[in-house]
Amino acid sequence: MPLPKPPAKRGSVLDPSAFDAQSAPKPSRRSLPKPAAVEDSSALELQPPQQPVAAPPITPAVVLAAPVEAKAPAAAPARPARTPRTKAAVAAAPAPAPAAATRPRRNRASTGGPAKLFVLDTNVLMHDPMSLFRFEEHDVYLPMITLEELDGHKKGMSEVSRNVRQVSRELDALAASQGDAKEFDPGAGIALARTGHREAGDKLFFQTTFVDFKLPDGLPQGKADNQILGVVQALRTQQPEREVVLVSKDINMRIKARALGLAAEDYLNDKTLEDADLLYTGVLQLPGDFWERHGKTMESWQQAGSTFYRISGPLVPSLMINQFVYLESPGNAPLYARVTEITGKTAVIRTLKDFTHAKNSVWGVTARNREQNFALNLLTDPDCDFITLTGTAGTGKTLMTLAAALSQVLDERRYTEIIVTRVTVPVGEDIGFLPGNEEEKMSPWMGALDDNLEVLARGDTSAGEWGRAATNDLVRSKIKIMSLNFMRGRTFLNKIVIIDEAQNLTPKQMKTLITRAGPGTKIICLGNLAQIDTPYLTEGSSGLTFAVDRFKGWPHAGHITLARGERSRLADFASEVL
């Protein structure tokens, strides 16, 4: 087929007006026209904190401001009527997304009063550098002594120093967003949403003037905590019409504040759960009438030595992927299964491999109770990339994990080696620096690893003394002990990573470790949420709790809470009564 003839003359260039006419309508053309009186949005947006104006009573549907008269443009009479806004509302949100502009402000709209004023203690910013933007529609106040304490902790490579430097960068960005310093009024505050954090609705205030306060004579005036308490007391006196609340992670600080009659609260935004009893356990007991309510439309089949059941009924919406279910009734065979698929209103459960029998032992270890059987099914599943095991002392977390890891590394050759790490938080007094390289320095922290390897070595009685010694050398060559301090930037390929004592990790540290996983890597986190030694961490804010809650229901993750101790009768009794 011959090619078409080339053009005889050059094409003409489109006029800009013609290009705009053919393009899609821009979102800015659909926005409301701004009143002519609004010239400087920042001047209308920032108001002094000393004289807050209470919002007028409004209905829940109208959350921006009291309506004023507004006429629709004459060119678009057929458009639906929009909610009118005042000048202050237009200035406060010059170009937000529609969803963000109509977000209800719960506390202020429900109470009808001014926003609360939260005074932040230094430890809150050290704990969560983004805490400035976690108070929604309420104002945030930073005393000058808080900035001084931040300046004293900015040096170093610890997690606290990194958080302090991030806070300083956020504060610098907020200060730089005000433009010319000569025109900025410190008493008016800084809008927290100026740096892109739309979840923050109001302003940040700095202490720029001396605050005269009078504390009891028994409190030293030069201590930083007492100066912050004095600032809270002075703000409460200056602004009696609004609620001034101190936010601190220090329990003694909150006790002293309440003793002085000041409102004080803990910083709760970092908590994944309010109560540790609400944590996902990974196990669900089926009701006694399960088969009567779910067996009418049930389908079953066998594959690879397991039985599958496809069920539908009222229990399906409460199930999660990789959740273990069991049904034990007198006179009937028990059912132990795992949820493998959820599609709409149906779910597929699969029976488990019985690790309580000696023929299915893993590196000589058999399950002694129901939860251990569930845990070994998870640990030996090649499709589970992330596993978390929690439980009290003596429940077999480390022993089962090591046995499953050695079986998959030495017997099945599924992984190349085992990497063990843990948080180096001492229980008592620190003994100082340890000699040697990285692995030698970590050896005193790995006493639990050595104890469990000794138990696994004693299980093999047929090899003799020389055989056990050779096995120990082989096992040691496949296990590497590493410190958490050198994990950043690494990538692990085809390895099993065991994180012991994971309850002492913060959510940020947990994210750093989990994101080290490369192709073919399995990460196993072990911990006891009742033994947290890291300051300012609780059962609700631990990184282990954070990981369990975020990974539940993911097809390649699983969690089991081990409830029964199997170490010894002495250890079990001590864990109950002490």
Image (cartoon, rainbow, N blue to C red):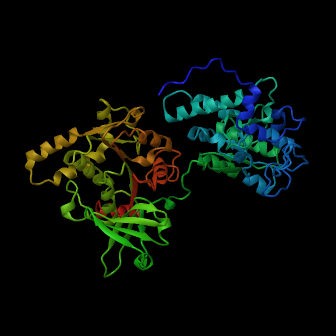
Q: Position of residue 302 (x, y in %)?
A: 29, 67
Q: Residue furthest top?
A: 9
Q: Nearer the viewer, residue 86 or 143?
A: 86
Image point 62% across, 50% down: which residue?
266
Q: Position of residue 440 (x, y in %)?
A: 29, 34
Location of residue 355 (image quadrant): bottom left
User: Does residue 103 lie above or below 417 as drawn?
Assistant: below
Image point 61% across, 33% down: which residue?
167
Q: Position of residue 319 (x, y in %)?
A: 46, 64
User: Does residue 16 lie above or below 255 as drawn?
Assistant: above
Whether residue 319 is visible to the viewer of this picture, yes or no, is: yes
Q: Residue furthest front?
A: 2
Whether residue 94 is visible to the viewer of this picture, yes or no, is: no
Q: Quadrant of the C terminus?
A: bottom left
> Relative to residue 37, is residue 269 drawn left or right?
left
Q: Nearer the viewer, residue 440 or 302?
A: 302
Q: Position of residue 154 (x, y in %)?
A: 56, 29
Image point 72% across, 34% down: which residue?
22
Image point 89% across, 43% down: which residue?
74
Q: Nearer the viewer, residue 64 or 460?
A: 64
> Relative to residue 528, is residue 161 drawn left or right?
right
